[in-house]
Image: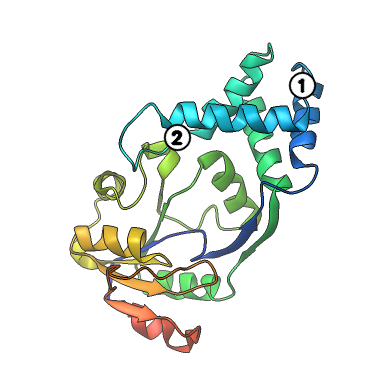
Amino acid sequence: MNRYANYIFDLYGTLVDIKTDETLPGLWDALALVMSDCGAFSRTGDEMREAYLRLCAKEQAKAADPLYEIELRRVFAGLYAENGVEADNNLIDETAYFFRAASTIKLRLYPWVLPVFERIRRGGSRIFLLSNAQACFTLPELEKLGISDAFDGIAISSDAGFRKPDRRIMQGLIDRFGIDPAASLMTGNDRTTDVEIANRFGMDSLYLRTETSFEIPGAPRATFELTDGDLTGLEGLMGIE
């Protein structure tokens, strides 16, 4: 039997190695062209980028809470609306994911993930995802990576309306799936979000330092830490049989 009944994972930088760049040459021109083909008025790439950033700022200003998470679907809907198109949900999601895919340089599952997930399952435990992310990007990427069915439950900050380490996103996951924090392990690559939110619930945590991790003086320490890149002891730290 595994040490924990529930294993909760961060996504980007923890399970998934990703690199995106929204300054890639031609990205905003391509988005403007795609939206124009869908009936929107023509815009230059620079105009499209300016409008996108303006609408993101407008959404962010709706709440003073620094952990408030915007829903980017509303931004893409706004881009269409400003250009005379009332976009349906499918068109919004397709456009959002086109933008994400066009700005993605690298997207791959870390090699350890599937073997660890398999052993967690064999030990009778559940697997959950708790991610600061945009659902319109993340859900298609989970499909692409082949792990959309790997989780017993998923909580994404754009759906919740707030991001880690806000207690509410973890509390929502706990309440929906009957998770006992004392019988759970939170694994992530960010001390200030993943480790901090686990600490707020008295939950054990595992910190994995990866390429996208960064160290901040005074940031909380995890129950277990793997900082040298040597993953041979990972399953032992997780208490996986």
Which mark is first along the chain, 1 or 2?
1
> What is the secondary structure assignment of the residue under circle 1?
loop
Q: Amino acid at mark 2?
A: Ile
What residue do we see at 62% from left, 15% from top? 81
**Residue 94 point in image, percent of width and height:** 67, 33
Nearest the viewer among 50 and 19 is 50
**Residue 78 point in image, percent of width and height:** 58, 21
Q: CA distance from mark 2 to mark 1?
A: 24 Å
Q: How many marks?
A: 2
Nearest the viewer among 179 and 43 is 43
What residue do we see at 48% from left, 88% from top? 232
Answer with left or right where residue 167 lies relative to residue 241: left
- Where 41 sits versus 238, above or below? above
How crowded is the residue under tag 2: few (<14 C-alpha within 10 Å), some, or many (20+)? many
Picture quadrant of residue 198: bottom left
Of the numbered discs in the image, which one, if any, rests on residue 70? Answer: 2
Residue 34 visible within the image: yes
Check if mark 2's residue and mark 1's residue have beta carbons within 8 Å. no
What residue do we see at 68% from left, 11% from top? 84
Answer with left or right where residue 59 lies relative to residue 67: right
Of the numbered discs in the image, which one, if any, rests on residue 38? Answer: 1
Q: Quadrant of the C terminus?
A: bottom left
Residue 89 visible within the image: no
- What's the colour scheme? rainbow
**Residue 197 point in image, percent of width and height:** 28, 57
Of the numbered discs in the image, which one, if any, rests on residue 198? Answer: none
Answer with left or right where residue 134 lies relative to residue 38: left
Q: Amino acid at mark 1?
A: Cys
What residue do we see at 45% from left, 56% from top? 151
Q: Quadrant of the N terminus?
A: bottom left
**Residue 188 point in image, percent of width and height:** 40, 66
Residue furthest out toward the top: 84
